[in-house]
Image (cartoon, grey):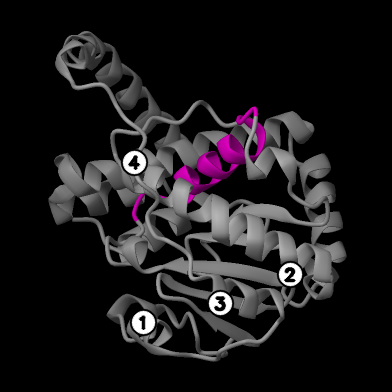
Amino acid sequence: MASDLDTVRVLRALFNDMPRAPQGLTHLETMAWIKQSMADFEGGDMAYTIEHITRNAMLDIVLRMREDGPLADDAAFDEIVNLISTKEGRSAFMDRCIQAQKSGAATERLLSRVQRPWTEPEPLFVPDPQEVQRFVAAQASGPGPMFAEYGAREDVRQIGVFEQPPEQVHEFAWGFVTEDQGDWNFYLAEVWRQGTVGYFERFLSAVQLETTGLPEGPAAASPMPASLALDVGIAAFSSLTLHGGDSLTDPAVRRWVGEVFIAGLLPRMAARVLDERCEFPERVQ
């Protein structure tokens, strides 16, 4: 089984030579820095986007192979981590994957014919209206049992996720949300108990499907505020991050996050993310 430490090792190997934003920037400064980095990247914005898509795909492949494939062996995993830390090694690894996929495609098509049809799973949890309204009212509960359980994990302590305590913690029955430096970070117990492996990109795909792919429902009736930006929760070691900057203090934005995102979208998409049979359409970058 791949661990969160395995995830960090693969991330560092894959993105060690990609530009990183300096610490201490404001939300607007960070967005400006990202745009400039994309423009300055060799080949421009498109090359930057393609490179990120490719490396994120490799992240998912390596972690899945670590979970139940040939990289379950520690020596083999160490070899691949070293390989993908260089441009030439990443190219060689992708060539191997392409060849393996060609040979496995026919088998996969045959297996798909005998699998039971996928059905929509029940929401992962039923939100407590009082907890949601407490969040909307900006009444932070402070750290509780969920925060303590997560903080006690060996990988969390080793990486130092909460060496600097978050500004605010909102505890729920299903997990907790931190409010820190212009971001909301979502921590779901059912996700971290399974190691969060392979779920970062699946959460982004699930959010995009909910907010752009549904013809009706709460997401369609109340689209995501323009001031919010989605991101994988890698930096905060969480399931998902919403960048909001100064809009975290906007009552309308907070109401959307509480009453639409937490109360409606999050339970449904978390159930899909954790259901390995659920295949998401290719995410638009």
**13 in the magenta segment:** no
As drawn, the label of residue 158 is 1
Which residue is rendered at x = 78% and y = 33% of the image?
Answer: 44
> Which numbered mark, 1 or 3, is in the foreground of this view?
3
Tell me which amino acid carries mark 3.
Gln
Callout 4: 10 Å neighbours few (<14), some, many (20+)?
A: some
Callout 1: 10 Å neighbours few (<14), some, many (20+)?
A: few
Nearer the N terminus, badge 1 or badge 2?
2
| Distance from Cα at disc 4 to Cα at disc 2 | 41 Å
Answer left or right for 149 relative to 214. left
Q: Quick check: marks 1 and 2 in contact, CB under 8 Å?
A: no
Nearer the N terminus, badge 4 or badge 2?
2
Q: Which residues are magenta?
A: 197-215
Q: Which residue is mark 2?
A: 22
Residue 265, compared with residue 181, is above or below; it is above
| Distance from Cα at disc 3 to Cα at disc 2 | 39 Å
As drawn, the label of residue 121 is 4
> Which numbered mark, 1 or 2, is in the foreground of this view?
1
Label 3 SS: helix
Can residue 195 be seen?
yes
Tell me which amino acid carries mark 1.
Gln
> Which numbered mark, 4 or 3, is in the foreground of this view?
3
Label 1 SS: helix
Callout 3: 10 Å neighbours few (<14), some, many (20+)?
A: few
Can residue 26 be seen?
no
Residue 49, compared with residue 265, is above or below; it is above
| Distance from Cα at disc 1 to Cα at disc 4 | 34 Å
Main SS type for the magenta part?
A: helix
Answer left or right for 222 relative to 8. right
As drawn, the label of residue 130 is 3
Locate residue 160, reporting x and y percent.
Answer: 45, 83
Q: Nearer the viewer, residue 98 or 117?
A: 117
